Image (cartoon, rainbow, N blue to C red):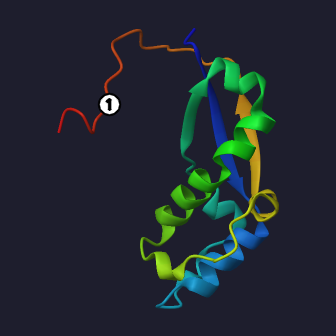
Amino acid sequence: MVNRGAVILRYKDPFVKWIKEADPVKDSSEVSLARANEERTVYLITDGDAENIGRWIRENHGVLFESELEGWYTDESMWPKKRDLKTFKEWFEVECHSVVLDTVGGQIFDDEIYQ
């Protein structure tokens, strides 16, 4: 067991609506809620933060919001201006997992450090 928790954000309808509206080529019609949620980023957090996920989300929603937006469009001018906690809760469902098991057992590396 690893001393981390895991957070996964699942998109809600308003996020998918933004994907489609922001698309400069307007070819995102195939992006459905189910399809947008097929591959999700897993954010590792401390096990203490996993026990207080509400507080952690309040403190980190801005960074999470921007990370998810950037995953779709890197041009920040395309991002919605309103990215407060209320909007975050309307756009994302938060899954928090307090038990994370490392089934590999080997050393964990940060790819950015070893490039």
Q: Which is nearer the eye, 94 or 52? A: 52
| Above/below status of 101 relative to 67 | above
Residue 108 position within the rendered picture, expressed as x and y whole percent measured from the top left: 36, 20
| Above/below status of 51 relative to 66 | above
Residue at 71% in and 66% down: 33
Q: Residues within 10 Å of mark 1 (few under 14, many from 20)?
A: few
- Residue 69 in the figure: left or right of residue 108: right
Q: Please tell me in which quadrant of the rendered image residue 81 appears.
A: bottom right
Residue at the far bottom: name it: 25
Residue 63 position within the rendered picture, expressed as x and y whole percent measured from the top left: 57, 52
- Residue 58 in the figure: left or right of residue 103: right
| Above/below status of 92 relative to 80 | above
Residue at 80% in and 57% down: 89
Q: Quadrant of the C terminus?
A: top left
Q: Which residue is identified by label 1?
A: 110
Residue 94 position within the rendered picture, expressed as x and y whole percent measured from the top left: 75, 45
Q: Which is nearer the eye, 101 or 112? A: 112
- Residue 74 in the figure: left or right of residue 18: left
Residue at 50% in and 14% down: 102
| Above/below status of 4 relative to 75 | above
Residue 73 position within the rendered picture, expressed as x and y whole percent measured from the top left: 47, 72
SS for tag 1? loop
Residue at 52% in and 81% down: 78
Q: Amino acid at mark 1?
A: Asp
Residue at the far front: name it: 59
| Total number of numbered discs in the rendering | 1
Q: Quadrant of the N terminus?
A: top right
- Residue 86 in the figure: left or right of residue 108: right
